[in-house]
Image (spheres, rainbow, N blue to C red):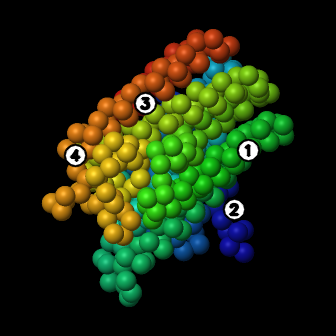
């Protein structure tokens, strides 16, 4: 009966019609339309569910770089050319942003993060709602539980939105294979990331790069680009392989920049607290290189990197003195340069080559 209610309300809610002037406007509009229908459907079942859906909508639409749909778009556009209308593939592009919200919400729960994009994280939002409503029980536990459910809901919604893309059976299989691989790799990378925090003494810079490859490169650049290429129809294996190599390089560089921002970033710009990686003892490539270069930067008895405080543990200044940040900067530059070289001879449209070249730089030289 509940499913009938949901489906009936989805059919009755009219789609908002907007003229989108840019890719990001188009993705935002698609998300807003889809989420408005989901909110109406859940509201009809129970007002509390509508409230949860509105909080979820706010998390999805709270900004962000929208890199995943952007890379997917240029993977698609590189194969189709500028004359192909974008409307049919918008649901697929926007679905990547719902998957991204799923990953962010769960990541913030695991990291116990207080802020994301300069705003309270999902579990903090729900804990605050619990407190203000005067409900029974522990607000923190309620917030964590609600956030996990919201992340799960976003993953389901991503599937539903992707299913609205009009694709042939063959194209659908190709798109889904990349989408599913992206999700598996993101989960695998996240598990290794969590494992690394509990056993940093067993980690190496090479293993940290593997985590970056799975957790970040795969679902930020590499697979979205291949996902977009698959949306265009029959896939050229050589182009698919080139996009795979470009995506891995740019994705790794993106994570290496994140490692630097996690230590040196301005919270007013990044929207996240400073020194989070140091306090958590996260074995990033930056911190592991620093430890290799200066073995005296030891681990504390619990196995984690010493916190960044007056106890003599790792601090931004000490890390800088090891030379590790300069090495990471060089790693970023090398990866971007190689990725741009890969683009040079690809049989893609010129506007896509230019855009992907600019994206490789913009995604890895960002301040947040």
Q: Position of residue 338 (x, y in %)?
A: 52, 21
Work out whether residue 306 or residue 146 is closer to the camera in this orientation and state it: 306
Give yes or no for contact between labels 3 and 1 (Cβ–Cβ under 8 Å).
no
Give yes or no for contact between labels 4 and 3 (Cβ–Cβ under 8 Å).
no
Label located before the other in sequence (4 or 1):
1
Label located before the other in sequence (4 or 2):
2
Label located before the other in sequence (3 or 1):
1
Quarter residue 219 falls in: top right
Up the image or down, 338 lies above or below 138; here it is above
Label located before the other in sequence (4 or 3):
4
Gap in angstroms between the C-alphas marked 4 and 1: 46 Å
Work out whether residue 297 or residue 357 is closer to the camera in this orientation and state it: 297
Gap in angstroms between the C-alphas marked 2 and 1: 24 Å
Q: Which mark is residue 272?
A: none
Q: Which residue is mark 1?
A: 176
Quarter residue 303 falls in: bottom left
Give yes or no for contact between labels 4 and 1 (Cβ–Cβ under 8 Å).
no
Relative to 24, is 305 on the left or the right? left
Q: Which residue is mark 3?
A: 331
Q: Secondary structure at mark 1?
A: helix
Up the image or down, 194 lies above or below 366; here it is below
Q: Which mark is residue 318?
A: 4
Residue under the image location 38 percent in, 27 percent down: 330
Gap in angstroms between the C-alphas marked 4 and 2: 58 Å
Relative to 247, is 267 on the left or the right? left
Gap in angstroms between the C-alphas marked 4 and 3: 20 Å
Q: Secondary structure at mark 3?
A: helix
Label located before the other in sequence (2 or 1):
2
Give yes or no for contact between labels 4 and 2 (Cβ–Cβ under 8 Å).
no
Q: Secondary structure at mark 2?
A: helix
Which class describes the residues within 10 Å of circle 2: few (<14), some (14-19), or many (20+)?
Answer: few
Work out whether residue 177 can be spotted: yes
């Amino acid at each position: 009966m509940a499913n009938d209610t949901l489906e009936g309300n989805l059919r009755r809610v009219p789609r908002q019609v907007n003229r989108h002037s840019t890719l990001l406007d188009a993705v935002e509009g698609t998300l807003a339309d889809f989420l408005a229908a989901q909110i109406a459907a859940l509201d009809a079942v129970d007002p509390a569910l509508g409230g949860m859906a509105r909080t979820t909508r706010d998390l999805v639409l709270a900004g962000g770089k929208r890199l995943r749909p952007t890379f997917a778009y240029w993977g698609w556009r590189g194969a189709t050319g500028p004359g192909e209308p974008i409307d049919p593939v918008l649901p697929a592009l926007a679905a990547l942003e719902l998957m991204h919200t799923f990953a962010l919400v769960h990541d913030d729960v695991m990291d116990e993060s207080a802020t994301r994009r300069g705003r309270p994280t999902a579990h903090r939002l729900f804990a605050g709602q619990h407190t203000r409503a005067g409900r029974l029980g522990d607000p923190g536990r309620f917030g964590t539980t609600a956030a996990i459910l919201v992340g799960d809901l976003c993953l389901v919604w991503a599937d539903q939105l992707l299913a609205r893309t009009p694709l042939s059976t063959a194209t659908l299989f190709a798109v889904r294979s990349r989408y599913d691989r992206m999700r598996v790799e993101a989960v695998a990378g996240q598990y290794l990331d969590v494992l690394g925090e509990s056993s940093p003494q067993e980690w190496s810079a090479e293993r940290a790069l593997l985590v970056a490859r799975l957790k970040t490169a795969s679902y930020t650049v590499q697979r979205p680009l291949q996902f977009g290429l698959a949306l265009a129809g029959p896939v050229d294996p050589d182009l698919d392989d080139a996009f795979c190599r470009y995506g891995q390089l740019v994705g790794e560089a993106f994570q290496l920049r994140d490692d630097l921002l996690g230590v040196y970033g301005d919270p007013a710009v990044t929207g996240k607290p400073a020194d989070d990686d140091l306090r958590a003892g996260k074995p990033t490539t930056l911190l592991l290189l620093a430890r290799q270069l200066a073995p005296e930067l030891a681990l504390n008895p619990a196995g984690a990197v010493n916190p960044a405080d007056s106890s003599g543990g790792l601090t931004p200044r000490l890390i800088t003195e090891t030379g590790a940040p300069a090495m990471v900067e060089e790693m970023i530059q090398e990866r971007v340069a190689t990725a741009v070289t890969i683009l040079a001879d690809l049989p893609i449209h010129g506007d896509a080559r230019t855009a992907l070249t600019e994206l490789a730089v913009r995604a890895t030289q960002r301040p947040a």
